Image (cartoon, rainbow, N blue to C red):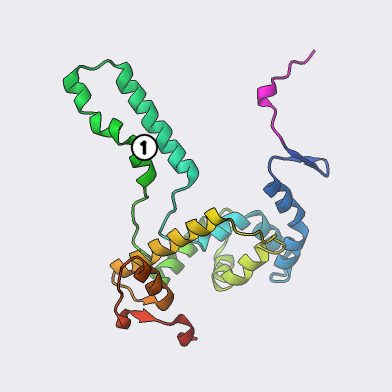
């Protein structure tokens, strides 16, 4: 008789004889035909089309080189767990008062450290630097070649649109909108602090935070088109 550990059973979705762990995986599977169809409208070679589909996530990442890394919920949880473990080890060591005093600040401010944690600011890449970095990342994908990398670099927008064909647009939650607002504020602040000109909308975001941006450092992106 086979013994089944119920703790090891996972909820899943059974589709076309296959088991998928998440609804997102099911949706990705369901979109495969229309995504590959969209890709084949861009490339004639079936082998290249298959390669593009199999490597779509890695390829998309090559064109998302935003230097501002957002702190995910999982990041905070990992930091919290690490601090909890460190504090537990300190307490278990039964240190004397002098040694224990060295850890007082960490123990007293652990929760605040988790709440206020941010990834270090990374210098923004110029358009030329982004192009070089993207090409390097594309070249590193197994099965790529110089001609394919050059084509992807030139047609990045079209190929990413093809990858996104058939995606269901969901209503954005209040939490997501709040996160987006924080992200836009961080981007505007970083550009302003690094001496870059910013858009009129970004200047308005900073103004709401009490930061005045001189008119000569603002521009309308639509006016350049």
Q: Give the range drawn in magenta.
A: 1-11
| Nearer to the camera, 119 or 171 | 171
The residue sitting at 43% across, 67% down in the picture is 130
Q: Residue 105: x percent and y percent?
A: 24, 33
Query: Is residue 97 shown above or below 202?
Result: above
- Looking at this view, name the residue that lies furthest to the top: 1
Query: Is residue 108 shown above or below 175?
Result: above
Query: Is residue 4 shown above or below 168?
Result: above
| Nearer to the camera, 63 or 98 | 98
Q: Does the magenta stretch include residue 7?
A: yes
Q: Residue 158: x percent and y percent?
A: 62, 71
The residue sitting at 40% across, 69% down in the picture is 205
Prevalent SS, magenta region: loop
Label 1's element?
A: helix
Is there any visible trace of residue 83 in the rendered image? yes
| Nearer to the camera, 190 or 62 | 190
Query: Is residue 165 shown above or below 201?
Result: above
Residue linked to disc 1: 111
17 horizontally vs 203: left or right: right
| Nearer to the camera, 5 or 182 | 182
């Amino acid at each position: 008789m086979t013994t089944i550990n119920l703790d090891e059973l996972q909820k899943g979705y059974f589709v076309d004889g296959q088991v998928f762990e998440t609804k997102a995986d099911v949706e990705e599977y369901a979109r495969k035909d229309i995504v590959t169809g969209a890709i084949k409208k861009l490339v004639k070679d079936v082998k290249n089309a298959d390669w593009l589909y199999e490597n779509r996530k890695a390829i998309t990442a090559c064109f998302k080189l935003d230097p501002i890394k957002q702190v995910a919920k999982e990041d905070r949880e990992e930091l919290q767990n690490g601090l909890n473990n460190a504090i537990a080890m300190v307490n278990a060591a039964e240190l004397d008062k002098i040694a224990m005093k060295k850890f007082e600040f960490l123990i007293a401010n652990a929760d605040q450290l988790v709440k206020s944690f941010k990834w270090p600011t990374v210098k923004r890449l110029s358009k030329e630097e982004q192009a070089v970095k993207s090409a390097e990342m594309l070249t590193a994908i197994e099965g790529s070649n110089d001609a394919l990398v050059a084509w992807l670099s030139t047609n990045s927008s079209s190929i990413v649109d093809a990858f996104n064909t058939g995606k269901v647009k969901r209503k954005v939650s209040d939490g997501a909108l709040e996160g987006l607002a924080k992200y836009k504020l961080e981007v505007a602040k970083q550009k302003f602090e690094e001496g870059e000109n910013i858009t009129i909308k970004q200047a308005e975001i900073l103004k709401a935070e009490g930061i005045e941006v001189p008119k000569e450092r603002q521009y309308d992106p639509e006016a350049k088109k």
